Amino acid sequence: MIELRNVAYSYGGAELFSDLSLVLGPGSFHFLTGPSGAGKTTLLKLCYGELTASSGEVLLFGADARAMDRDMVALARQRIGVVHQDCQFLDHLPLAENVALPLTVAGRKGDAAQDLADLLGWVGLTAQAGQLPPQLSGGERQRAALARAVIMSPDVILADEPTGNIDWEMSQRLLTLLIELNRMGKAVLVATHDLNLIRAAKAQVQARVLRLRGGRLQSAGVDL
């Protein structure tokens, strides 16, 4: 569904990484780890068309991202759910409306009511539906961010340090939701520094662990 072929990316005249290849196929689960500044967030942005590779090919659902116009990229992004490291919400809107924003933007708000209610129940936020974002805890915000990322029923879930600011119990809960999505056939890619989270996941799902370091992407194997 998303494929990177011999991709390089340069930032400020310096090459961040090169010769990077990755395939996110249906039902695959990947963890991306590596030191700060290695380019994990940049790699995720290449996967959803936010950035353009300096060289190599990025294929979004079979189409070359470099040849896609703005409308084509927007359509591809409807099939990609992104959970950002700093989950941003509109503080003047209640949680339910924030989660439903992708449907609103796509002109599908009218048929969202039942799906939205089911989704909030799935992430355990039914009681918080009317609360404003500043009233939510860190864990509630992260689960809301995941709900917003999947409300369009995407084929691919990309999560950038989704458990970075929450406790272990909430991290486990978020991981359970990601594994459930994966078992529904979604491709999942999680960038994280949390090796305990990776170990917990590998006990439940067949996950590939990748390490981005020194400008190269390598399989981390079982050595964590």
Image (cartoon, rainbow, N blue to C red):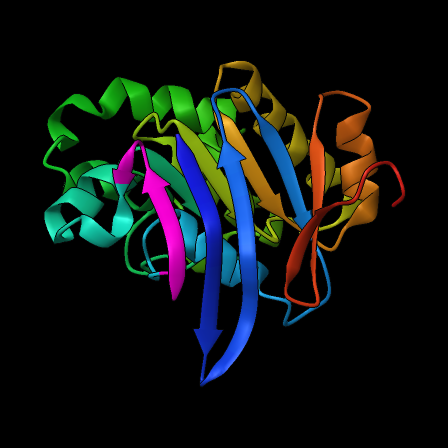
User: Is 149 left or right of 122, judged from the image as shown?
Assistant: left
In terms of depth relative to the viewer, which is nearer, 123 or 37? Answer: 37
In terms of depth relative to the viewer, which is nearer, 14 or 209? Answer: 14
Say which residue appears at 25% left-offset and 44% top-offset.
101
Q: Residue furthest bottom?
A: 13
User: Is 37 left or right of 65, judged from the image as shown?
Assistant: right
Say which residue appears at 27% left-offset and 48% top-offset.
65
Magenta-colored span = 53-63
Where does the image place residue 186, in percent across and percent down from the top left? 47, 23
Magenta-span inclusion, residue 176:
no
Establish if 113 lies above or below 66.
above
Say which residue appears at 19% left-offset and 50% top-offset.
67
Establish if 210 lies above or below 23.
below
- Give the tally of numbered discs: 0
Tell me, yes or no, if residue 146 can be seen here: yes
Q: Quadrant of the N terminus?
A: top left
Q: Which secondary structure is most common in the magenta stretch? A: strand
Magenta-span inclusion, residue 58:
yes
Where does the image place residue 86, in percent across and percent down from the top left? 50, 61
Where does the image place residue 132, in percent across and percent down from the top left? 38, 53
User: Is 124 left or right of 103, judged from the image as shown?
Assistant: right
User: Is 38 left or right of 131, judged from the image as shown?
Assistant: right
Q: Quadrant of the C terminus?
A: top right
Where does the image place residue 192, in percent across and percent down from the top left? 68, 51
Locate residue 182: give its quadrant.
Answer: top right
Say which residue appears at 32% left-offset and 52% top-offset.
49
